[in-house]
Image: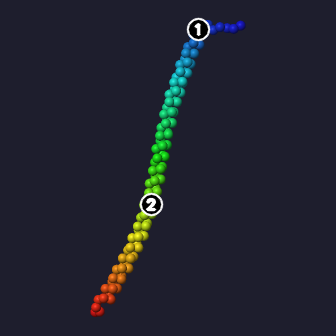
Amino acid sequence: MVEYPSDQGRMMLAEKLEDLEGRVRTVVALVTKLKGEKAGLGQRVEELQAVNKAQVEQVGALEAARRKDQEQLVRMQEEREEVRLKVDHLLEEIARIEASVEPGD
């Protein structure tokens, strides 16, 4: 024997079904919204990765330029020291020449 629900039972089932349908609609709407947000966040991540890549390349270029400048600075310091030594040597020679040219006291 199959028992059929009464009208009151059917109404309760219909209400529960409507409640569940409402919840399902809410969940579906939320999932749809989250998928959209996820896509937007994915795009933002790609944009930030591109910015990061550009900054890494820029930092690499700046580091290379800094190394080149440092090498040039070292060369210039070495050249300056060589010139200073040559000038000191020339001043010593000039002093010797002047001493030999001056009449004896």
Instruction: Give the residue displayed 38% in from the left and 73% down from the top.
Output: 83
Q: Is residue 14 left or right of residue 61?
A: right
Residue 22 % position (x, y): 53, 19
Circle 1 is placed at which residue position? 8
Amino acid identity at mark 2: Lys
**Is 98 placed above or below 3 here?**
below
Numbered disc in front, either 1 or 2: 2
Image quarter hosting the C terminus: bottom left
Q: Quadrant of residue 24?
A: top right
Graded by Cα atoms within 10 Å as few (under 14), some (14 to 19) or many (20 or more), the crowding at tag 2 reads: few
Element class at badge 2: helix
**Is 98 placed above or below 15 here?**
below
Residue 21 % position (x, y): 55, 18
Image quarter hosting the N terminus: top right
Q: Quadrant of residue 94?
A: bottom left
Residue 90 is marked as none
